[in-house]
Image (cartoon, grey):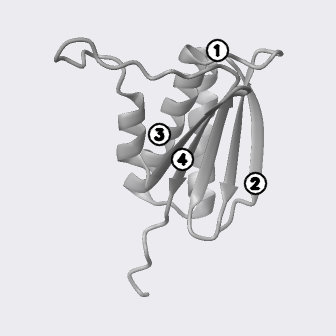
Amino acid sequence: MAVTQQEVWLTAAPTELAETRRLADEAGATYGLKGDDRFAFTFAVNEAVSNAIEHGSPSPDATVHVRFTAERDALVCCVRDFGQFTPKPPVGEELGTRGRGLAFMAAMVDRIDLCRGSTGTLVRLSKRRAPSPCG
């Protein structure tokens, strides 16, 4: 039950989201995530790629980089675009129907890291396997 590493460059287009979900679900299954945990990981990865497509900038060849890695204690997905992410505070007291992507991702995974730099934005999502009931 191990995903060593898988990398893919997806075209920065919403049509790639179905492939994103397929890859995330497959990585989760291979790693040993079950049921709700696998769904949550897939949901978070889909949101990260969706945000990179909508709010980031693609690479010079119009792609977004996605990498799945099995670490000792978690399945990790890194999503990288080449734009400059600037969080925008909500206007007024209402959040509205948009602008909650990071909060959704954080609720679905065990850890989220956001790295902003001059060469782009990287979102790192980590999801641990549930402990075996037999120890």
The amino acid sitting under disc 2 is Gln
Quadrant for residue 96, please give it: top left
How packed mark 1 is, by other alpha carbons closer than 10 Å (few <14, some 14-19, many 20 or more), is some
Q: Is residue 106 above or below residue 122?
A: below
Mark 2 vs 1, N-terminal side: 2
How packed mark 2 is, by other alpha carbons closer than 10 Å (few <14, some 14-19, many 20 or more), is some
Estimate the spatial distance between the alpha carbons at disc 4 and disc 3, rounded to whole Å.
8 Å
- Please provide percent x and percent y for residue 53: 60, 18
How packed mark 4 is, by other alpha carbons closer than 10 Å (few <14, some 14-19, many 20 or more), is many
Q: Which mark is residue 5?
A: 2
Residue positioned 24% across, 19% down in the render: 95
- Please provide percent x and percent y for residue 109: 43, 50
Q: Which mark is residue 31?
A: none
Estimate the spatial distance between the alpha carbons at disc 1 and disc 4, rounded to whole Å.
21 Å
Residue where numbered disc 4 is placed:
125
How packed mark 3 is, by other alpha carbons closer than 10 Å (few <14, some 14-19, many 20 or more), is many
Q: Which mark is residue 44?
A: 3
Secondary structure beneath disc 4?
strand
Q: Nearer the viewer, residue 133 or 96?
A: 96
Q: Is residue 41 above or below residue 20?
A: below
Q: Which mark is residue 13?
A: 1
Estimate the spatial distance between the alpha carbons at disc 2 and disc 3, rounded to whole Å.
18 Å
Depth check, mark 1 against mark 4: the one in front is 4
Mark 4 and mark 3 residues within 8 Å of each other at the beta carbon: yes
Estimate the spatial distance between the alpha carbons at disc 2 and disc 1, rounded to whole Å.
23 Å
The amino acid sitting under disc 1 is Ala
